[in-house]
Each structure stands twice: as structure tokens, then as C-alpha cells.
Amino acid sequence: MRVPLSWLQEFVDLVVPLDTLVERLTLAGLEVSAVEHVGADWPRDKLLVGQVLEVKPHPQADRLVLAVVDIGRGAPLTAVTGAPNLRPGDRGQKVAVACEGAELWDGTSAVPRRMTLRRARIRGVESVAMLCSEKELGLSDDHSEVLLLDPEAPVGRPLQDVLGETVLEVELTPNLARAHCVVGLAREVAALTGQRLRGWPPPDPLAAGPHQARTSFVTVHSADPQLCPRYSAALIENVRLGPSPLWLRQRLRLSGMRPINNVVDITNYCMLETGQPLHAFDYETLQLRQGIVVRPAAAGERLRTLDGVERVLAEGMLLITDDRGPIALAGIMGGEDTEVTARTRHVLLESANFHFLSIRRTAQRLRLTTEAGQRFGRGVDSTLTVPALLRAARLMERLAGGRLHPEIADTYPLPPAPKTIALRPAEVRRLLGMDFAVAELQRLLEALEFRCTPRHDTEGAYLDVEVPSYRLDVSIPADLVEEVARLHGYDAIPETLLRDVLPPQRSQPLLEGVERTRDILVGCGLTEVISYSLTSLETVRRSVVDAATVDAAAYLRLANPISQEREVLRRSLLPSLLETLRTNSRFRKRLLFFEIGRVYEPQPGEELPREPRRLGIALSGPLLPPSWHYHGESPEQLGYTHLKGIVETLCQRLNVPEVRFVPASHPSLLPGRTAALELGGQRLGILGELHPQVRERFDLPDQPVALLELDLEQLLAHRQPRRYQRLSRFPAVLEDMALVVDAEVPAQAVADAIRTAGGELLRQVTLFDLYTGDPIPPGKKSLAFSLVFQADDRSLSEDEVRVLYRRIQQHAAATLGAQPRQ
């Protein structure tokens, strides 16, 4: 929320420096994320308030005029301008005058650009100054006319003092809905600085009522008081639509809203000021024989909203209706047929209260986010409707020339009962660890406009606290204790040490293993990503070759998803990794990602799913950074073999022995380039190269994509403790062995046979060559291994090594049909 400081000062005196105010608000839970100083870069001696003394025709141009302005110093200045709101014969207007040397935004440039003003001769007449538009000052993009200032602005005053402003940007959590307006924030400031809120609600003879649902101009009715507790309306007659005054437009822009016209701007202004959303109907477009009725929609009803979209409504969505049908989507957006236009003469002004859940659900189902919907979705005080209505109506009288009808239509069938909470000092001490006297508690709470009555019973003194109607977030004693802590200051709560004995420290092997996995993968050059646990069935279907194999019933679906892209809980990390690759492939070619996250697998007969922790890896792009490539050389691409190497490194450093890679298939991966990771006959995961059809569906570059997904918890469960062995003092014997086997025999099976036959003296087996072709017979392949023989107590003799070598050959021949390569 953006709040101009001058607006805040209309309701509370600011008696502390700005830095102190920002600190106190932030420590009280209202984080000030930024402070913007509008006009801080305006030169005080070159941007001034000027008064037009005379506007004369330009002697050489029909569309230009000569404006003679007084800036309160020296001789009057002449400025050549083509602004349509200055015409020959005009005089007396206050304008923003830039003198020679002033640095401004270029009003004629399509892109933001600064310029330094120089005197220039325009069609034979020298222009020594500029009359600024809002664009030159950086206030908006409007360059259509000269900015006309308040007639009371002093001539010669630096423009920084007249239009300069300080804006606080406050980050509000949903429970701080009461502060989502200028008045609400002013209440907090008053309490934190020892001041009092002033000017709200403004006195008005119509405020006290009594108000009736039936009036001479409209009857209002709520068909469901639970969904619409209150509906108020006023009639402002004979309004004149036009632009709002500069001060109002400026405040709206600084608050992040776009000015439209005086009537609409007033409704937005009052919403920002009071927190109560308002809506203006063109009264003459309504059919009100039965009046205004607030009711739930029937399935299939339609309404064209102000954004020009015809919306099909679901049953239960709350509507504002007249005799013809829907005229507005309650609490979210008005209808196009009854909007205020240039032809509007009479305005029916709505100020209502709606149940926050109803508005929130409707906004989410229609994917329609508005300022009004956000406020109603967090909860709005029902007693606010009439004060906000009168505030807006009086502004329409003042700024649009209208006249407020002396009746206010108001239906309020179920006013909420006052809330009273008993607060005992012992409860405050229990939660905060501090002692507060009853009088101190009363002082702190009354500063926040709680009404406190001291009481006494057998347990001692306490307070009966009446909760203000706008404090929808306070319902139990703990809420009051939180207010005491906020106002006293979280930073003022003393630090205390734990009195109990510290619990014994126990190791967490699983968590330690997860962190070790992260460290290893980062050391391998990968970057960790964290993606949403929610995905969509559409994304899942795109991630497999045959979308028909996806069973929607196997996924846990959210009852109230925030969007179609986040409707089910994922069962695999691969779709998330593919989306991450797609997003990042637009910015870089070399992508090495990993994610450690949970997946969600429904269990038959169980309410909650299994949530195993998985590891996913995705590789794509060149193996080496661009600076490592020779000019003109085609870089090697990351692929399956590189991913396999990373997995082997991970298993080796986690000390998980005997992991095997066996041929497998997967619906997302390319056949023949896919392997399963197995340990002790149990499958841990899958790795391979992404199928080209899936790659195209995710708009990935035409290059290999290697993917892995494995059960990390199972992998870590097989970690072995590290045992260190003494290095042998005796030399090793190195031998090579080439064996010819059937083409379908895995190299892993041959290596296992070699290790089995080699026994303890065979320390290492490494595959270094695979060969097919002449002279190897068809259907055969040659595998060459490097063998390392070594003993701890002696140097191996040539005869011992020869015996071991022959034994290995014989065992391989007997078990695999392997023959030595000649």
C-alpha cells in the first residue's frame, strides 16, 4: 500500500522524524518497504510556481501562443507553448515554470529520457522558459496540456514545496486489513507516537440517521444477510463529470491508481482513505420498481463487467441486481450497462458490506482481481458503509457540482454484537514473560481505541475490553496480548534464558545426508532450484509421450486451487524440472539443475498421502562454458553419460556401494537411452535422455536433455560408514584383459564376474574400451578392462598374477561365455 505523507497528516500529527516513524511502524508489524521522495530531484531555483500575466497569439504560428509569466523574481518570462488549455486572452493561471538550465523529462520522447532546458528561438520568437506538463515533471505520461496548479499556490515558490511529496510503501499482511487505508494507518501512527486520530469520521447531519431500506429514490434489500450484512446507497443529483482537481489526481497517482473522472476518482479516493469500497451507478440506467436486491446468482446467469468481458456466473456468486437482473458483481466490479459515462446526470452511490469468503471465492473462480475485491476478501467493517458513503457524497457535491438527496437508503438486518474480552495480567505474563500493571494495559489498549473497564474478582484485577468494530482480527485474549506487545515494542521485551536443561543433542542422519547431497551436487557444478509442489494435469500430460497414460484419479486435487497451473499435487519432480528448464532456456544455453523435494502419492484407505523425498537432476546445453571452446568448434553437449557420471560421483561420495545401472524404460525418456538405478535388487530411480516429442512440447532447444529422478531417502538409507584401510607398502601389478562376449551382455555383468573370480587380491576393475567390428564376429563385442592386483603383506609374483588372470578368464567363460580377444 502506498500512502502520501501529506494525506496521512490530515488525520494525525507527525511528531517524530521520518526515520523514527518508519522504524516504529516496521517494528509494530507494518513493514515500510520503501520511502519515495517525489520531486526531490527538482532544482529549487529553476522549477518555480509562476502566474500567467498574458497569453498572446504567436505571430508566425496558428497553433502556438506566447505565455508571459511572473515567477516572483526579475522581469516576466516569455514561453512559447502549444498547450490547448492556454488560449489568447487567458490570465491568472498558476503554472509550473522551468527556467533555463533545469533538467526535465523529455515530454516528446517515447522512451524515458532526461533533457536540459535551453532557451530557443521558435518560429522567430525566443522562448526563455517552459510551462511544464505532468510528463516533464515525471508525475505521469500526460503531455497533452500544461499543468495548472492550485490558484492559492504562492508565486515564486519552488515547485518542490508545492507538489513535492513523500510516499510510504507499506507491506501489509492479510491480518492487517484494518490498516489498508489512510485512516487505518493513521490510527496505528497515532497509537505508536502518543497522538490522537482526528477528522474521522467527519461530522455530517445525515450520519446519525435514522436510515431506512425504503426511500423515495430506491429500496434496498439483502436476500441473504449472511452474505451481505449491510447495503447502503445515496443519490447525488445533477453531477457534472469532468477531470478531478490536481490534488486529487496527484494523490491517486501516488497511491498507484489511474485518474479517470471526478465521480469515479472520488469513489477510489474514498476507498483508499477509509478502506470502504464504493461503486457509482448511472441512476437513470437502473430499473428500480422493485429496488436494489443483493442475492446469490443462479447457475448460468451472465453479466458484462466494466472491463468489457461477458462473464458466465456460477451458482452462489453474489450479485447486485435491479428489476432487469445483474448490474454488478458484488464487492468486485460493476456492470458495463450501468457505468458512469459523460452523459450521466444522477449517480446512485453504493456502499455495502459483504462476507469475505464469498468475495474471495468469486474473485478466484473468475480470476478477477480488483482493489475492492482485495479489501472485501480480507474483511471490512460493516459500520463503515454510511460514513464512507457520506464522505464520497460530500466530495461529489464539492467537486462535481452535485446535490446529495436528504435520504440515505440502508438495510442492516443483522448488526454484529459487541465483542468483550476479559484480559488478565497473568495471561499477559504467561505469553510475554513480562509483568504489566492493569493501568498500563489499559493505557496501551485505549491508545488503539479499545474501550477498557477495570474489574476485580477473587483472582485479582483484570480488564473487560470492548473490541472496536473495525478490529475483525481480535477475538481471544491472545489477540489483545499481541496488541500489547506491538505497542509496547517487540524490541523492548527483555531477553531471557531457558531455565530448563537443554535437551540432548542427537544426530539426524537423514537431514545430514540431504545436506551432504546438496554439497556434492553443487560441487559437481549444479545449481539447486525450488519449484512449486503444485502442478497441473496439463503439464503432467505434456511431460510424457503418451498423454493417455496419465490417470487423473491418481493425483490429489486441491478443492480451491489458486490457478489452473496449480491444481494438483505432483507425483514426480520431472514436470517441475522441465518447466524450470523452459523458463531458463530463454536466458542461457548451459543449464545444470537439481531439486530436492517431496512428491505426493495417495494411499488407498488413508486420508493422507505418502510424501517421499525425491532428487531430480536436469542437464542441457554445452558441456563446457563458451570461453573454453575453440573458434568454430562444435561444442560437446551434456547428455546421458555426463548425468551418469554425476550419479556415480554422488554415490561414491555418499559411500553407497554396489549401485547398478540397468536398461529400463520410462514414459518421458528416449528408449535405448534410459537406465534404472538399482541397489540390492531394489529400484531407486530412473535416468535417461528426454524424448524429443516431450522436448518439443516444452519448447526446449533442439539439444539433448538428460533427466534423473530417484528416491533420495532410499539412497541415503544404504549409506555405509567409511572404513579406512592402511595403504599397502608393496607395489601393485597392472594388467589389461579384453574379453569377447555376446552384444547383449551388460558390461556391468562382466565386471562383476571379474571381481568374483579375482578375490581379495584384485583391488580395482575399470572398463576402458568397447569395440565392435572386424575382426570381432557379428553379434559380439569386445570389452577391455584395466585390472589392479595388490597384496598387503608381500609383493605378488608373476606366477601368482598369472594364476589369478587365468582363473578370471575361466570364470568369465563359464558364466558368460566370454572368450579372450586374440
Image (tube, rainbow, N blue to C red):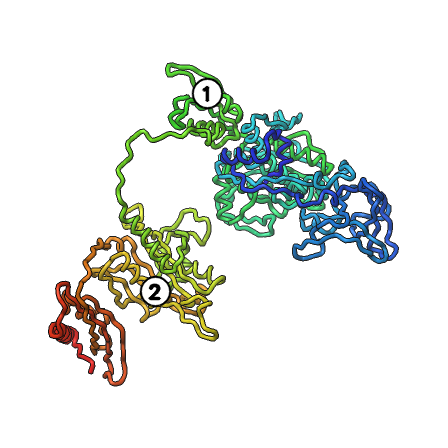
In-image side of 235 versus 295 (left or right): right
| Precedes in sequence: disc 1 or disc 2 | 1
Question: In the rendered image of this protein, does residue 777 appear above or below residue 307?
Answer: below
Instruction: Measure the C-alpha gap from mark 1 to mark 2.
Output: 67 Å
Tell me which corner region of the image, top left, top right, bottom left or bottom right, holds residue 97: top right
Tell me which corner region of the image, top left, top right, bottom left or bottom right, holds residue 208: top right
In-image side of 399 versus 220 (left or right): right
- Count up the numbered dots: 2
In which quadrant is the N terminus drawn?
top right
Point out residue 355 in the picture as x, y percentages from the top left corner: 50, 37
Q: Please name the residue that numbered disc 2 is placed on.
A: 643
Amino acid type, callout 1: Asp
Question: In the rendered image of this protein, does residue 665 appear above or below residue 336?
Answer: below
**Residue at x 43%, y 58% (from the top left corner):** 580
Residue extending farthest front: 729
The residue lying toward the viewer, choosing from 670 and 568, is: 670
**Residue at x 55%, y 49% (from the top left corner):** 302
Amino acid type, callout 2: Leu
Residue 90 visible in image: yes
Residue 464 numbered tag = 1
In which quadrant is the C terminus drawn?
bottom left
In-image side of 409 versus 500 (left or right): right
Q: Residues within 10 Å of mark 2 (few under 14, many from 20)?
A: many
